[in-house]
Amino acid sequence: MSSFLSVRDLKVHFPTVDGIVKATDGLSFDLERGKTLGIVGESGSGKSVSSSAILGLHRRTSAQVSGEIMLDGVDLLKLSDEDMRRRRGKDVAMIFQDPLSAMHPYYTVGNQIGEAYRVHHDVSKKVARARAIEMLDRVGIPQPDRRVDDYPHQFSGGMRQRAMIAMGLINNPSLLIADEPTTALDVTVQAQILDLLQDLQRDFDAAVIIITHDLGVVAEMTDDVLVMYAGRAVEYGSCKEILTHPEMPYTWGLISSIPDVSGDTSAQLIPIPGNPPSLLNPPSGCAFHPRCTHRDKVPGDLCTTVLPELLPGTRTEGHLKRCHLTNPDVVYEREILPEIAPDLVEER
Amino acid sequence: MSSHDPKTSHEQVPAGMAMPNEDVLSGAENAPDDAASYIAPVSRHAATMGDPNAKAILEVKDLKMYFPVKSSGIIRRTIGHVQAVDGVSFQVPAGGSLGLVGESGCGKSTTGRLITRLYEPTAGTINFDGQDISKTSARGLKPLRREIQMIFQDPYTSLNPRHSVGSIIGAPLEIHNILPKKQILPRVQELLEIVGLNPEHYNRYPHEFSGGQRQRIGIARALTLQPKLLVADEPVSALDVSIQAQVINLLQDLQDEFGIAFLFVAHDLAVVRHFCPEVAVMYLGKIVEIADRETLYNRPNHPYTQALLSAVPDVKQAAIGGRRERIRLEGDVPSPINPPSGCRFRTRCPLAQEICARVEPPLLQIGKRHKVACHFAGELGKHPDKPVTAGLLGVDDSGTPDPGASPSVDVGNEPGFADTWFDLERRTMASA
Amino acid sequence: MFAYVIRRVFIGVILLIVMSLVTFVLFFASPVDPGRYACGKNCSPAQIEQTNKALGYDKPVIEQWTDFLKGVVVGREYPDDPALRAAAPQLVVECPAPCLGYSVVNSVTVNEELKERFPLSLSLALAALLMWVTGGVLFGVIAAVRKGTIVDRGIVALSLIFYAFPAFFIGLFLLKFVAIKWEIVPVPVYTPIAEGGLGLWLQGLFLPGLTLALLYMAGYVRMTRAFVLESMSEDYVRTARAKGLKSRKVLTKHSMRAALTPLVTMIGLDFAGLMGGAIITETVFNYNGLGKLAVDATVTYDLPTIIGLVLLLGTFVIVANIIVDVLYAVIDPRVRVG
Ligand SMILES: Nc1ncnc2c1ncn2[C@@H]1O[C@H](COP(=O)(O)OP(=O)(O)OP(=O)(O)O)[C@@H](O)[C@H]1O
Ligand SMILES: Nc1ncnc2c1ncn2[C@@H]1O[C@H](COP(=O)(O)OP(=O)(O)O)[C@@H](O)[C@H]1O
Ligand code: SF4
Ligand code: SF4
Ligand SMILES: [Mg+2]
Ligand SMILES: [Mg+2]
């Protein structure tokens, strides 16, 4: 049986005057209802472009989208524009990073939430407004019947993101994509929003994709993780596997370049050298090679000439990684872990 | 582990790890001349260690900044004030770092701007290197601008796009007439090298650089005049995670090498923990807790600090299985125009009682290097039932003035730490 | 909002007073002797001096200016000479408040002059405005929606062509060919509504209005196109699309409303500017509007008329600005509800 959402070899290419930008270049993953997938990576790695493709938001004139996006047995990429539009906001909904700019400044919050309902339901404005109030209440806005007539700028950042969530969930979608839903928020508000998302997911039994660059959010929220680099998946597996036994140098880099609020203060902060590559002219072979500090462990010039496949890692079947290293588990245990979590090494 | 010696707690990348170099880059079809693809050498660091005996280079006392709020009537009267910063006191040790954390709008940046004197404080003193600079005139500030520099959050807007990197970094040298024209370029190149940029790229323009590199340019500019104090306002918030670490480590290198003191403003508690041996937590314009790193992160005593810390997702903890219980804070930060009476945190505090609305809790020293402003200060789960401050303030447990009691300890708002403090357990004064 | 408008009006009045002073001072700082112009070509120095005296030009500038201000508030008489009034009241011209002065050159109060020209200029500006805004926005939106296609390029190229042609050329072409030679439309003659009714009024305004509209439209097409394109990449437009809204609705309800807001400012200022700025068009069609009046007054060094015009047009700019700001508040709730 195939999964609820199954993406195969998704490619999104943008033809530009300077050449083709391969923003997403062969992405595949699966997701079941009630489960959460986290997509992590640096900015520009193709996270938002990929998720917009699932919603069919790319205009045919500016982007070439290919591959297969099967949602509940239907290939979304084969639908006509009109059929895709009917599903957008109803079966698949999305909430965006910056809730202030994602809401129209000239319309009330209630109007915008109600509009999302009226697109897919033939009801009067009054009914839609009542639904909007109900949803605002559901996402924890106090006095929803009064706040419904406020404009977005009258809401705080956290309230705006709640309103966006209300807008996303008003049609009971089976797939919710949250693109950096808490990046613009303070930690205490982030915690509130993450809790809310978790509650709602349970109630709605939706499949959720959370896009983030924050491994902390991934750790707390997701079942599976997909790490993206330069438009490709470089590591994919269960959240716990990936965070405890990562097998790809880029993932190591991500983990070792963030400090933690607890644990040993003698842990080293090890940045990834260099900058993310240009997608117009990505590095040959493994796209990460110009920044990789483990290249010398791979014989010959494989890293610079041959693109590694996304293959099962050393530990479990479902854990995939894109790297030529043959013993990443050993390298991680010996070289990385002692540097970044000396206390954990002792425990193990 | 010799982690207490700052010199040994960091090192350059060990020889065993291949450093990417430039021939690899050209092999990768990246034009070697492309500014954004220059790979800077990176260093790695453990958390910075502080020297508790260092003398303070900056001492701020009772600093206040009130911004007037104008009415919208025919004649625009001042109808109130945004109490952006309301009586903060702290010290920054020479060559050390103090972290300033808190939610958006709590007054962190305003504090930073006051210290660089981009604003004139409403009240309070700013003692820099033995001199009160809080009232210094614009002209008197000029020499000061050399000693205190600022690094800004947004590397995209803080650099003038029409000036070359060389003139951005060299401008302070010209303005202050420090070097003859001929020596400016070599100095600029030296600075570029220090911050990990290609020294040959001095004639490039900011847009040719990536975000992390632009932040390096901002840092080079701040370093030009060899300041003693750097106010870093969210220096890494706008950067990608992997780049954040590069910049933090660069700042750490610079601190070790040049002995620069930092006031490090950020909302990211983990970054602050890594960079600052001492941290102050702000809420609505006030410091609610200030302590050394170990105490603040492991044994916070203020309910707000506790909530803040529990809200931060912890990768390593979560990865080994334990998803911690969060303390949920309800609602939003109130407006600083009409802050709540008494304790400003009381509208969201899970422990708030009558006294909290009546009496403002003083910032009370409760340990060797630990101060907290809460009537019910205590470690998580061990908060006392009765206010610890009642006796000190001469009020009863509900906060009404108690004519019988007389305030027993002087709880002034002094910067720094005293040798004696109020012991919460025994409710008496203690010392080391 | 009300308080805001009052405050703006107040500031506007002060601005006008300052403008009148500046005009006075500049006028007298110039090396030209106003009395010579007023008196005529063959006047002797004595006559010129007498003229200057009669017109009050011999008084200090500031005094003339305060007299002028007084006239605006309570009205005045020309010449301001009690003896003459007693002797020959028929020679004294009554100029009731708000008196903007008396043009010796044209022997009429400035108020009369302006009153005569004003309706034409206003009508012309309105007609042009209507045409260029509809055309500009329509073609701008079409170009934005069809971005990159032949339609888009065609519209942009065409608007550039019109932009490049000078006003007198377009005006002359429309007049000499469209009206006179090909007789597609009648030769325009301005007829006030009161005299010829709506039909003739519109007929008289069509060609000169079109001349101005074509000039302005080019800019508006390009601006509208740019604003709509910009708003189409806004996050909230993406949100609207993500809801599943039809693209037409996304365009009209979400994209255009935001894109057209900045146009309001431009429209207000351009309209106010056009009131006295349609000189070439008025000349080509031989229409006696404010623009022509301004040119004539400058050539004959007719100080009172110039000052009156400056103030009238200044008032227009100020009023247009206030209206624009009020409109802004109506359109954008962020301005309205703080
Ligand atoms: N120039 C100003 N005029 C009026 N109010 C101001 C001004 N600057 C700051 N404020 C207000 O002062 C308070 C503190 O602002 P500040 O910028 O210091 O916050 P912050 O802690 O740095 O927040 P963030 O994390 O968002 O940067 C806020 O309520 C802000 O709106
Ligand atoms: N319309 C477009 N035309 C050309 N390039 C684009 C377009 N949209 C996105 N890109 C490029 O695709 C890459 C991936 O972008 P995105 O998915 O937004 O990154 P992120 O991982 O930060 O969400 C970036 O390099 C971006 O510049
Ligand atoms: S394939 Fe080579 S360059 Fe790429 S991540 Fe693995 S070791 Fe590094
Ligand atoms: S003083 Fe009261 S309200 Fe304030 S933090 Fe302590 S318990 Fe909470
Ligand atoms: Mg993105
Ligand atoms: Mg700030």
Image (spheres, helix red, strand yellow):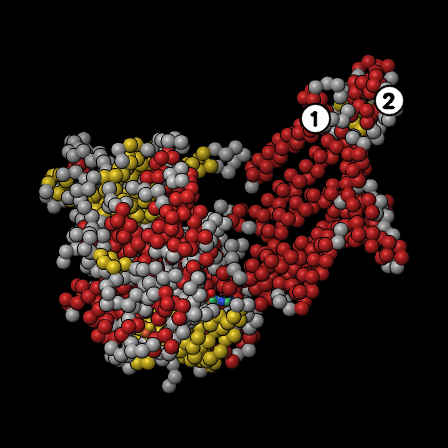
Q: Earlier in the sequence, mark 1 or mark 2?
A: 1
State left or right for residue C126 relative to residue B172.
right
In space, the residues marked 1 and 2 are separated at their CA atoms by 22 Å
Chain letter, disc 1 residue: C
Residue at 83% of width from left, 50% of height from top?
C204
Furthest-front residue in this view: B182
Question: Which residue lies at the image location 34% right of the left edge and 56% below the top edge?
Answer: B196
Q: Amino acid at mark 1?
A: Ala
Q: In the depicted view, which residue is nearer to us: B96 or A1?
A: B96
Secondary structure under tag 1 reads helix
Q: Quadrant of the N terminus of chain B?
A: bottom left
The chain identifier of the residue carrying mark 2 reads C
**Mark 1 lies on residue:** C29
Question: In the image, B25: left or right of A266?
Answer: right
| Residue B73 image point, x, y percent | 52, 36
Work out whether residue B30 can be spotted: yes
Disc 2 within 8 angstroms of ligand 1 (CB): no
Compare residues B105 and B224 and report the one nearer the observer. B224
**For this rendering, which residue is in front, B298 or B32?**
B32
Q: Which residue is mark 2?
A: C43
Is residue B380 among the parts visible in the rendering? Answer: no
Q: Is residue C243 left or right of residue B247?
A: right
